[in-house]
Image (cartoon, rainbow, N blue to C red):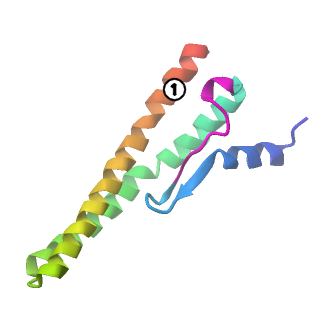
Amino acid sequence: MKTTTDTKDWLESQFVYSERLGIPVPRLAADWDELSLDMQAAVLEQWEMIRGVIPERVIRLEAQIRIKQDRLFEEEDFAASCRLNGDIADLASRINDLHIWFRTQQDLDMGTKRHG
């Protein structure tokens, strides 16, 4: 019989922190369909909590973009402008990836409902 600690440890092991995105993302140890309904529900509950911070994370990245755009507007050095443009593109890519992860909930829910 699994203890609460074992279950919590298992659940935490299903997610890995992404330095790039600033959130944990799913890294399931088994195929979704191989998980019991209880395990699927636990993963969905954990993901919903993580997913809830994505909008705030996007807002912070957008603020960083605005700061870099302001610096870019004032920058006269071409190499520095190129670096700022690269930084802005990287931040925009992170935002795009966060939006994709935010929509992942719908896919997981549909998989659970199909089997439920």
Image height of 50 relative to 37, above or below: below
Residue 29 at x, y percent in the picture? 67, 39
Rendered-image quadrant of the N terminus: top right
Q: Quadrant of residue 85?
A: bottom left
The residue positioned 17% from the left and 80% from the top of the image is: 79
Q: Quadrant of residue 43?
A: top right
Badge 1: residue crowd in 10 Å (few <14, some 14–19, many ≥20): few
Compared across the picture, whether 111 is left or right of 61 comes to right
Q: Which residues are magenta?
A: 24-34
Compared across the picture, whether 99 is left or right of 36 comes to left
Magenta span has 28? yes
The residue positioned 37% from the left and 41% from the top of the image is: 100
Q: Which residue is mark 1?
A: 109
**Residue lying furthest bottom:** 77
The residue positioned 12% from the left and 84% from the top of the image is: 77
The amino acid marked with disc number 1 is Asp
Rendered-image quadrant of the C terminus: top right
Helix, strand or loop under label 1 = helix
